[in-house]
Image: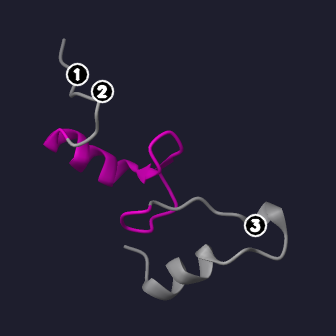
Amino acid sequence: MARKSVIARSEKKPKFPTRVVNRCFKCGRKHGYMRDFGLCRICFRELANEGKIPGVRKSSW
């Protein structure tokens, strides 16, 4: 996933507010980010399948 230097750089306050990039707190990925959970889609799926996210379960119909 993201390098440690990229994650550290994104945690600093940017020069302009429009440069803020949301990143997954677990792996540092910036694409596929879900604001409600603070996770990327990959980490969200892993944690949801393990049952570690309350109120989320795999759908089936």
Identify the residue shown where x is 52% and y is 62%: 23
> How much space separates mark 3 and mark 1, taking CA atoms?
36 Å
Secondary structure under the numbered disc 1 in the rendered image: loop
Is residue 41 highlighted in magenta? Answer: yes
For the residue carrying disc 3, how many other residues have a C-alpha within 10 Å: few (<14), some (14-19), or many (20+)? few
Is residue 58 highlighted in magenta? Answer: no
Secondary structure under the numbered disc 2 in the rendered image: loop
The answer to whether 25 is drawn above or below residue 4 in the figure is above
Identify the residue shown where x is 47% and y is 50%: 38
Residue bearing the label numbered 3: 19
Identify the residue shown where x is 60% and y is 82%: 9
Q: What residue span does the magenta drawing correspond to?
A: 25-51
Q: Which residue lies furthest to the left in this view?
A: 50
Residue bearing the label numbered 1: 59
Amino acid type, callout 1:
Ser
**14 left or right of 4 in image:** right
> How much space separates mark 1 and mark 2, taking CA atoms?
12 Å
Q: Residue 28 carries which label?
A: none
* Residue 14 x/y as whole percent: 76, 74
The answer to whether 60 is drawn above or below residue 16 in the figure is above
Residue bearing the label numbered 2: 55
For the residue carrying disc 1, how many other residues have a C-alpha within 10 Å: few (<14), some (14-19), or many (20+)? few
Which quadrant of the rendered structure holds the N terminus? bottom left
**46 left or right of 24 in image:** left
* Residue 31 x/y as whole percent: 50, 57
Which quadrant of the rendered structure holds the C terminus? top left
